[in-house]
Image: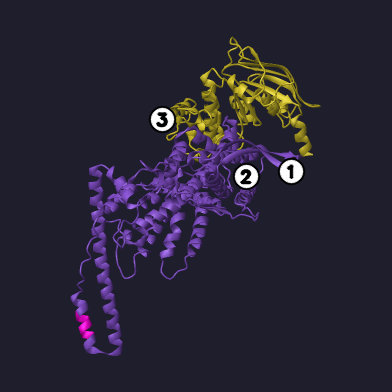
Chain colours: A yellow, B purple
């Protein structure tokens, strides 16, 4: 799946982030290639959220380098991160359930004719693009004018992903996309991620708690614990027990089993 | 054991029941208000049919005669102007309680500027001749035009709207509290200003009204007389009126003569009818008296007379004089103050003239023209509503307003300038309040502090009845318009119900308001609870 002849789309080298005295990230390095799903795993407090926030421009890094397409970047605002091709899909998805699919797809970036915010929205064109872009990653919506509230959680996730890709995201960061969903919808979302992977030019960073989901679609893993990388490797190199152990921050699940058994 | 399975091809969409042809219609949020509005219009129509008369046509009632329509739509349009501002703001998730006080403030501001002019004064402390305040006059406008007064007032109200919005988005304090402060503050400032500017020379506190403004919208330009009020012009000495008439082209005079002749004949005919009605009434009274006293022969004679009908001599139509024509001509002269006329004048006059002269409908019981047109505030309401509809449903700004109210964080995350959206809408409610005030001031040529009292709550109620949800993100302009019509017409409709206290309209509106809020919330939950 990974084409190592290509350059990685994003490289993170020795990233350090300190909040005052507290070291949230202590020299994290990872890279993601186009068409790759890179699973970022770790327990609560491992530094996953901080890493996303640094990558999406919410917090500036204390030290270390981020290279996007080989060029060094330094984000001060979320806008700068979006402009250089990093699209983050947060858990709350940033959707307005009361308005239509199209209005959400183009929220804040409406296609319009006319002066300033009083330009007329080109609804027909926007509807067409919405249907096309959603179909590209595997969801056919019949009516783009339906309120987002009538869509399933999986479809909403797809909408948010399609939106990020359409507006130029080459590096897609998915923050626990399968949490808070039913079984079937989780599968829907995983299929969507698979479809995005097939597009071939997008690097995906998948943050998850769910080891089963990670094993279904990830090409590579990086495990975080207490702000440091404690292990990484290709999917085929890692066994199920390794993943379980590393996810728990290196503690032996077996020990826990013994403890519980005792 | 084999688990039972049924049709694996079942899709999520299969769980939705079949949609009937009418279901799209009933899913619209405006459907409830539309029903209530039709009910109220029917009530107003049928209950206002005069006693003893019968008609299946609701438009035969007094509620829908020309004057009734003119007056009802004035109440509706005035409320409608502020309801649009309030409704748009609620859709964006905030609300403004200072609207009513803003109306009082704007009206007072405009009237005072029109009466006394406007000066920009910087106060400073002076020690010459003892400690006291003095004012440094930067500039002064002594004889402001209606437009100048309106623009200066807009500067004040829009800045105040901006300030409220800015305070709310920057501090995060609930708009309820900030605008409640605005409600007290503006009403107080208005009262203080009225008393201060009206202060009599003997230093007693002044009244809280501004009166004796000229009838600005009716100032016209007559060659040889300059700018003059219409009524003053009509009361000029006869020789001067004739002089004015001599400048009028012949075909205009012919047309005016025809119209005046028609009016005079109509008045005469109605006088004849009234006279015969009066005669019959007198006869019927005597008949009753005769019946009571048991005078059988008298009863017979009177019954015969009534059945035969009464003949009254036809009232002769008044002859049209040149003075009448001159006065009628002065009525047709176009105003020299278009801005004042835009807000306070009448519209659709040609339509109402056609209804009188050609359709024979717009006639009062004396045969004169009943309503000369609709109040101009109807047009102001219509224009603002059209702009609001366009902005909310078609433009980028509309999408921003919906998303700001629907999910503030989502809007922010997608780069919508939510603070600007909110501040602009606070300014828009202030703008609407100013338009309301302009319509009132230029129409009645007076202003007082009590103007606009409680209008903020009525505007919110009208918007909610029209399907706007108070938590934001949900509602339409059409709904707000329907809600306003319901609110405006309820009072009239209940007034005409025989044997019922007129205040029952408040009972009715209260119930409708709560019912509407429940329905709106239900629709909203149905939309967002789809997971």
Q: Horizontal and vertical percent for residue A88?
A: 60, 27
Q: Nearer the viewer, mark 2 or mark 3?
A: 2
Say which label, 1 or 2, has the lower sequence index.
1
Q: Horizontal and vertical percent for residue A75?
A: 66, 21
| B168 in relation to B293, above or below | above
Residue under pointer 2: B175
Q: Mark 2 lies on which chain?
A: B
Q: Quadrant of residue B386?
A: top left
Q: Mark 1 lies on which chain?
A: B
Residue under pointer 3: A124
Q: What element carries label 2?
A: helix
Can residue A145 be seen in this snapshot? no
Residue found farthest to the left:
B308
Q: Is mark 1 on a helix, strand or loop?
A: strand
Can residue B475 be seen in this snapshot? yes
Mark 2 and mark 3: Cα distance apart in space? 37 Å
Residue under pointer 1: B132
Magenta segment's dominant SS is helix
* Residue nearest the viewer, comparing B190 with B384: B190
Q: Which quarter of the figure is the N terminus of chain A placed in?
A: top right
| B348 in relation to A24, above or below | below
Crowd tier of the residue under label 2, counting other residues whose Cα lies within 10 Å: few below 14, some 14–19, many 20 or above: some
Mark 1 and mark 2: Cα distance apart in space? 39 Å
Crowd tier of the residue under label 1, counting other residues whose Cα lies within 10 Å: few below 14, some 14–19, many 20 or above: few
> What range of the chain is rendered magenta?
B299-304
Mark 1 and mark 3: Cα distance apart in space? 68 Å
Q: Quadrant of residue A62?
A: top right
Q: What element carries label 3?
A: helix
Q: Quick check: is B521 in the magenta stretch?
A: no
**Residues at badges 2 and 3 in contact (C-beta under 8 Å)?**
no
Q: Mark 3 lies on which chain?
A: A
């Amino acid at each position: 799946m990974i084409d190592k002849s290509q350059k990685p789309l994003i490289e993170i080298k020795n990233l350090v982030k300190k909040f005052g005295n507290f070291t949230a990230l202590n020299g994290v390095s990872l890279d993601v290639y186009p068409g790759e799903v890179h699973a970022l795993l770790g327990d609560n407090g491992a530094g996953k959220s901080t890493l996303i926030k640094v990558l999406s421009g919410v917090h500036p890094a204390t030290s270390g380098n981020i290279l996007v397409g080989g060029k060094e970047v330094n984000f001060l605002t979320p806008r700068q991160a979006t402009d250089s091709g990093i699209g983050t899909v947060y858990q709350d998805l940033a959707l307005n359930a009361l308005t239509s699919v199209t209005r959400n797809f183009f929220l804040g970036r409406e296609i319009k004719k006319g002066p300033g915010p009083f330009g007329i929205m080109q609804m027909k064109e926007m509807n067409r693009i919405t249907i096309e872009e959603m179909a590209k990653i595997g969801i056919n919506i019949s009516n783009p004018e339906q309120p987002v509230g009538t869509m399933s959680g999986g479809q909403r996730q797809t909408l948010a992903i399609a939106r990020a890709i359409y507006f130029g995201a080459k590096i897609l960061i998915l923050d626990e996309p399968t949490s808070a969903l039913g079984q079937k919808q989780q599968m829907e979302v995983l299929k969507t991620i698979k479809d995005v992977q097939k597009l071939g030019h997008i690097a995906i960073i998948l943050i998850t708690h769910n080891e089963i989901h990670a094993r279904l679609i990830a090409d590579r893993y990086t495990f975080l614990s207490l702000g440091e990388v404690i292990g990484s490797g290709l999917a085929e190199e890692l066994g199920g027990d390794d993943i379980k152990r590393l996810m728990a921050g290196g503690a032996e699940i077996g020990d826990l089993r013994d403890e519980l058994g005792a | 054991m084999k688990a039972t399975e049924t049709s694996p091809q079942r899709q999520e969409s299969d769980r939705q029941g079949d949609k009937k042809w009418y279901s799209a219609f009933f899913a619209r949020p405006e459907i409830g208000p539309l029903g209530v509005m039709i009910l109220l219009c029917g009530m107003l129509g049928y209950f206002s049919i005069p006693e003893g008369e019968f008609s299946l046509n609701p438009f035969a009632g007094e509620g829908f005669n020309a004057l009734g329509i003119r007056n009802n739509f004035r109440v509706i349009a005035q409320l409608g102007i502020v309801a649009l501002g309030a409704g748009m703001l609620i859709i964006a998730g905030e609300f403004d309680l200072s609207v009513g006080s803003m109306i009082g403030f704007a009206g007072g501001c405009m009237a005072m500027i029109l009466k006394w002019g406007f000066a920009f004064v910087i106060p400073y402390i002076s020690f010459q001749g003892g400690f006291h305040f003095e004012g440094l006059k930067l500039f002064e406008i002594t004889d402001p035009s209606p437009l100048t007064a309106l623009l200066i007032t807009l500067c004040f109200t829009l800045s105040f709207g901006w300030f409220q919005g800015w305070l709310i988005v920057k501090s995060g304090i609930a708009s309820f509290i900030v605008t409640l402060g605005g409600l007290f503050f503006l009403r107080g400032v208005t009262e203080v200003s009225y008393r201060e500017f009206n202060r009599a020379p003997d230093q007693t506190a002044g009244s809280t009204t501004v009166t004796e403004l000229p009838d600005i919208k009716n100032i016209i330009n007559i060659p040889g007389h300059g700018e003059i009020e219409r009524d003053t012009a009509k009361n000029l000495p006869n020789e001067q009126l004739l002089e004015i008439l001599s400048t009028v082209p012949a075909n205009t005079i012919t047309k005016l003569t025809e119209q005046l002749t028609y009016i005079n004949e109509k008045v005469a005919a109605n006088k004849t009818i009234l006279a015969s009605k009066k005669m019959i009434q007198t006869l019927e009274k005597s008949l009753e008296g005769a019946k009571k006293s048991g005078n059988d022969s008298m009863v017979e004679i009177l019954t015969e007379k009534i059945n035969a009908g009464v003949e009254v001599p036809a009232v002769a139509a008044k002859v049209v004089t040149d003075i009448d024509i001159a006065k009628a001509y002065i009525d047709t002269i176009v105003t020299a103050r278009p801005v004042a006329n835009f807000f306070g004048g009448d519209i659709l006059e040609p339509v109402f003239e056609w209804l009188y002269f050609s359709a024979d409908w717009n006639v009062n019981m004396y045969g004169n023209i009943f309503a000369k047109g609709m109040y101009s505030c109807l047009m102001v309401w219509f224009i603002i509503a059209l702009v609001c509809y366009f902005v909310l449903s078609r433009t980028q700004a509309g999408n921003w307003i919906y998303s700001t109210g629907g999910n503030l964080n989502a809007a922010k995350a997608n780069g919508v300038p939510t603070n600007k959206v909110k501040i602009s809408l606070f300014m828009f409610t202030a703008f609407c309040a100013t338009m309301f005030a302009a319509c009132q001031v230029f129409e009645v040529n007076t202003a007082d502090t009590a103007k606009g009292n409680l209008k903020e709550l009525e505007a919110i109620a009208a918007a909610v009845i029209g399907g706007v949800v108070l938590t934001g993100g949900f509602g339409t302009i059409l709904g707000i318009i329907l809600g306003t019509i319901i609110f405006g017409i309820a009072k009239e409709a209940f007034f005409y119900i025989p044997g019922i206290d007129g205040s029952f309209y408040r009972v009715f509106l209260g119930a409708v308001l709560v019912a509407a809020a429940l329905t709106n919330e239900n629709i909203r939950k149905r939309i967002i609870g789809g997971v």
